[in-house]
Image: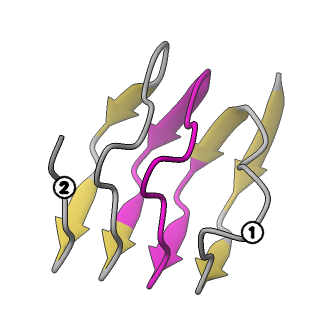
Amino acid sequence: MEEFFDLTIESLDTQSPELTPGQYESCKFLKCDFSNKSLKEITFMETSFDSCNLSSAKITLSSWKEVEFKNCKIIG
């Protein structure tokens, strides 16, 4: 499993590739569109999402620990 630390990922859109499965720790996602994308087999630890769209994201087998959401859209 890959591990990612202290990354800032900005402006992903529906045309961007899927996130690599693994563990994302102390990362920041800014203005990313994850709508209908697969977040399968991803662990988010101490991670923040700011102004992101997570509507209908596929979160099977994912884990969310101490995650913060600001101004995000999350439905479905």
Question: Residue 19: x and y, percent?
Answer: 71, 49
Q: Crowding near pointer 2: few (<14 within 10 Å), some, many (20+)?
A: some
Magenta stretch encompasses residue 5? no
Question: Residue 39: x and y, percent?
Answer: 55, 37
Q: Are marks 2 and 1 in contact (CB under 8 Å)?
A: no
Q: Is residue 23 above or below residue 73?
A: above
Examine the image and state in which quarter residue 20 appears. top right
Question: Between 17 and 22, which is closer to the camera in this rendering?
Answer: 17
Residue 31, label in figure: none
Q: Is residue 11 above or below residue 49?
A: below
Q: CA distance from mark 2 to mark 1?
A: 19 Å
Left or right, 53 with respect to 35, comes to left
Q: Crowding near pointer 1: few (<14 within 10 Å), some, many (20+)?
A: few
Left or right, 11 with respect to 52, comes to right
Q: Residue at x 83, y 21 (%)?
A: 1
Provide the residue span drawn in magenta.
25-48
In the displayed image of the protein, which residue is found farthest to the right? 2
Question: Between 6 and 19, which is closer to the camera in this rendering?
Answer: 19
Q: Looking at numbered disc 2 in the image, what kind of residue is underneath it? A: Ile
Magenta stretch encompasses residue 39? yes
Question: Between 44 and 59, which is closer to the camera in this rendering?
Answer: 59
Q: Residue at label 1?
A: 16
Q: Looking at numbered disc 1 in the image, what kind of residue is underneath it? A: Ser
Q: Residue at label 2?
A: 74
